[in-house]
Image (spheres, grey):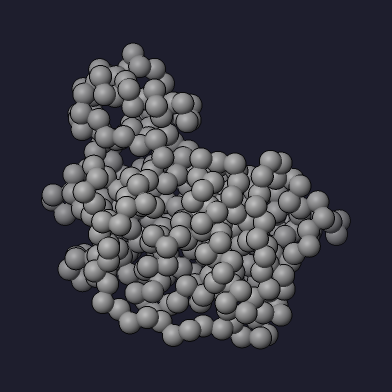
């Protein structure tokens, strides 16, 4: 459910010269992570939009060994619509980079860093950016100490999963033990974080520009997997409900977070606001969802950018050589 009052953007067709430059585009989707189903939906939406814009694109459902994707490529570049480990964590980016194949989005280091919520928070702290207090948990024996140290309620999450998979809000040491065991089954690295009570916002970034912020509200405990992808009663506010100066401050914080992690072209930053009006960074997403419930297309539409134009803009940046592709080419010329 959206509060948007924005006109639909005009239909978009990619210029013929750009279509020629882009060549044949493979949309990588699916994968083997816990986010496979969401990735398939994102990939199909991206593919349909590219084809509608006139781009020569086709789908690749990536399964198993990623090295096979570059053995005999019949494409010129890749639009990465893979979410989660394997596709969003720098692994695929490194393989494509070594093969000299241009790809969308962030490069290896930023992808790996943003996928790891714990180490992203270390970077935020080191750069003086606000993020909720946190610590790692490696044993159920630590539950009492962590509750005393951080004070409930707390958020428990696998450090390297996306789409809010495995995240739980807990109020007691007993609940923390249960949540830890669930999270640890998904990832050996478990992050426990201070729970920020207040409104949630997300800011999408496109080509070093912050798009209109979206305010999120749900009847769920928080903006979880169901609220993101399944529920029809999640409320999206554009305008986000903040005063103009506060929204500018929010957008700048998102840009700062995106830049310190080293991200490229597009992504999304999730932020909470407490009762005192302070903003708190949660995480950076380098391959956000692109489904019919997704936030980046929603923010782009509010900025007058159609879904077709959005995916072509993201793809356009692959024409600027990225670090991995350049290094691979230099190595082959040596």
Q: Nearer the viewer, residue 255 or 75?
A: 75
Which quadrant: the N terminus? bottom left
Left/right of residue 267 with respect to residue 32 in the rendered view: left
User: Which of the 4 image quadrants contains residue 125?
Assistant: top left
Most extreme residue toward the left is: 276
Residue positioned 55% across, 41% down in the render: 33
Most extreme residue toward the right is: 334
Residue positioned 39% across, 60% down in the render: 293
Instruction: Answer above or below: position of 247 versus 95.
Output: below
The percent coordinates of residue 113 (x first, y second) are 51, 44
The percent coordinates of residue 73 (x first, y second) are 78, 58
The percent coordinates of residue 161 (x first, y second) are 46, 40
Residue positioned 42% across, 51% down in the render: 284
Left/right of residue 205 with respect to residue 324 in the rendered view: left
Residue positioned 42% across, 63% down in the render: 292
Most extreme residue toward the top is: 141
Instruction: Answer above or below: position of 245 versus 285.
Output: below
Q: Nearer the viewer, residue 272 or 235?
A: 235
User: Which of the 4 image quadrants contains residue 9?
Assistant: bottom left
Q: Nearer the viewer, residue 165 or 113?
A: 165
Instruction: Answer above or below: position of 10 versus 302.
Output: below
């Amino acid at each position: 459910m959206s509060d948007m009052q924005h006109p639909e953007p005009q239909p978009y067709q990619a210029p013929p010269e750009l279509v020629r430059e882009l060549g044949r585009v493979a949309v990588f989707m699916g994968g083997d992570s816990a986010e496979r189903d969401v990735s398939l939906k994102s990939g199909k939406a991206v593919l349909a939009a590219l084809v509608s814009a006139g781009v020569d694109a086709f789908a690749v459902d990536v399964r198993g060994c990623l090295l096979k994707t570059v053995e005999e490529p019949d494409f010129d570049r890749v639009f990465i619509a893979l979410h989660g480990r394997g596709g969003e964590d720098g692994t695929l980016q490194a393989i494509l980079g070594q093969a000299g194949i241009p790809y969308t989005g962030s490069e290896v280091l930023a992808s790996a860093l943003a996928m790891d919520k714990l180490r992203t928070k270390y970077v935020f702290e080191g750069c003086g950016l606000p993020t909720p207090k946190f610590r790692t948990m490696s044993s159920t024996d630590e539950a009492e100490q962590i509750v005393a140290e951080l004070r409930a309620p707390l958020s428990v999450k696998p450090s390297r999963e996306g789409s809010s998979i495995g995240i739980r809000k807990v109020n007691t040491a007993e609940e923390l033990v249960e949540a830890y065991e669930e999270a640890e089954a998904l990832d050996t690295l478990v992050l426990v974080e201070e729970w920020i009570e207040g409104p949630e916002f997300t800011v999408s970034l496109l080509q070093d520009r912050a798009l209109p912020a979206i305010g999120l509200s749900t009847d769920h405990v928080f903006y979880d997997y169901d609220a993101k992808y399944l529920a029809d009663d999640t409320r999206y506010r554009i305008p986000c409900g903040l005063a103009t100066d506060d929204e500018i401050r929010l957008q700048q914080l998102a840009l700062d977070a995106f830049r310190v992690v080293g991200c490229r072209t597009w992504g999304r930053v999730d932020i909470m606001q407490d009762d005192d009006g302070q903003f708190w960074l949660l995480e950076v997403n380098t391959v956000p969802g692109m489904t019919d419930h997704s936030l980046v297309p929603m923010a782009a539409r509010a900025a007058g950018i159609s879904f077709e134009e959005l995916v072509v803009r993201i793809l356009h940046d692959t024409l600027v050589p990225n670090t991995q592709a350049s290094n691979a080419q230099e190595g082959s010329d040596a």
